[in-house]
Image (cartoon, rainbow, N blue to C red):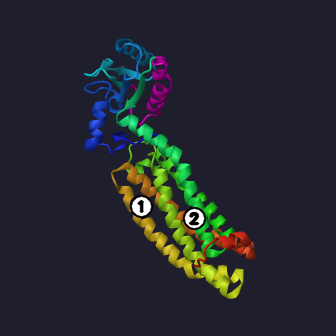
Amino acid sequence: MVSVGAGADKPGSATRLAYDWIAEADGPGFGPGADGQVVTVVDLRHAGVPADRIAADVTRALQRTPGVDRFTPVTPSMDGKILASTVTPTTGPQDAATTGLLTDLTDRALPNALKGTGAHAYLTGTTAGQSDFRDVVGRRLPVVVGIVLVLAFLLLTAVFRSAVIPLKAVLLNLLTTAAPYGVLVAVFQWGWGDALLGLSGPVPTESYVPMMMFAIVFGLSMDYEIFLLSRIAETWRRTGDNRRSVSVGLSATARVISSAAFIMTAVFLAFTVSPTVVVKMLALGLAIRVVLDATIVRLVLVPSAMFLMGRANWWIPRWLDRLLPGLHA
């Protein structure tokens, strides 16, 4: 994933015009990499060799690194504790090649140049900061998803006194959470129908959009899930008839769930007219997720699965039943 920059803004907007003028390779511009410059900073506080030698090594490393268009002289600070150089890539900040260049500089080129000197190099600036943020999000996303799923499973188990229903809910929510990600890739990264959203071409998916979408839509889907299951569980406790419970629960909640989903979908789709690309991504992803969740999952898959599984829906290990608090829907 790479970050969405001003190059994805609406053509003719002030931010897009400024971006294009700066990125022009011919004419008044400075080339596409001028919008994605990074600053190389070398910490000399623990260096065991002269600063001028380190500066020469860093200069050679930058000259030999593919993807570097140009860079300013490696210059020491006034107190002599750091060296700094502004590096301009050959590609723009939204280009995957720029991300590859940052990885090459931090993992290979600069460490090799400073090996044995005691000095350490770092990259800073907006482009480098976004790259670090993407890496952090990528590492933390599985942890966030895992924690949310475990807590949701435990809560649903405590409420409905079943291990099967929460497991089914978690798996189906993962299914409908993944589907909008594919739509975003097709629309924004592959450019399928991007003109309908006012985009001038394919754009990358913003790094934090998947995490935000998961957090928002998982909460919405759990609302629909609990609303449906509460009515089913109420009838089950009263009659002990699983088929009747599913039928009553679905008939009592289907219209409400569909109406609520329609309203939420309309609200989300309204935000697709926003000039901000990230807002468009979130709006379209959330709308697709709500439609899938309220139709295919809540009104088809959940009732069908519960109807087929019969009394097994309400199975729970005795030891788990004893451990969980006594909550009821």
Amino acid under disc 1:
Leu
Is residue 308 found left or right of 126 in the rendered image?
right
Pointer 1: what residue? 269
Is residue 90 found left or right of 143 in the rendered image?
left
The relative height of residue 58 versus residue 210 in the rendered view (above or below) is above
Q: Quick one: 312 or 147, which is closer to the camera?
A: 147
Q: Main secondary structure of the magenta part?
A: helix
Reply yes or no: does residue 90 show up in magenta. Answer: yes
Amino acid under disc 2:
Ala
Q: Quick one: 278 or 147, which is closer to the camera?
A: 147
Q: Residue at x 63, y 80 (%)?
A: 233
Can you give x and y, in whole percent of width and height, for residue 207 in the image?
46, 45
Can you give x and y, in whole percent of width and height, for residue 172 in the image?
62, 62
Which numbered tag is attached to residue 152? 2
Reply yes or no: does residue 16 show up in magenta. Answer: no
Q: Residues within 10 Å of mark 2 (few under 14, many from 20)?
A: some
Can you give x and y, in whole percent of width and height, for residue 53 in the image?
38, 11
The relative height of residue 164 versus residue 149 in the rendered view (above or below) is below
Can you give x and y, in whole percent of width and height, for residue 100 in the image?
48, 30
Q: Tell me, yes or no, whether the two marked residues, 2 and 1, touch with CB atoms within 8 Å.
A: no
Q: Quadrant of the C terminus?
A: bottom right
Calculate the distance from the C-alpha at mark 2 to the C-alpha at mark 1. 28 Å
The relative height of residue 131 versus residue 314 in the rendered view (above or below) is above
The relative height of residue 71 versus residue 2 in the rendered view (above or below) is above
* Res 202 visible: no
Q: Earlier in the sequence, mark 2 or mark 1?
A: 2
Magenta span: 88-116
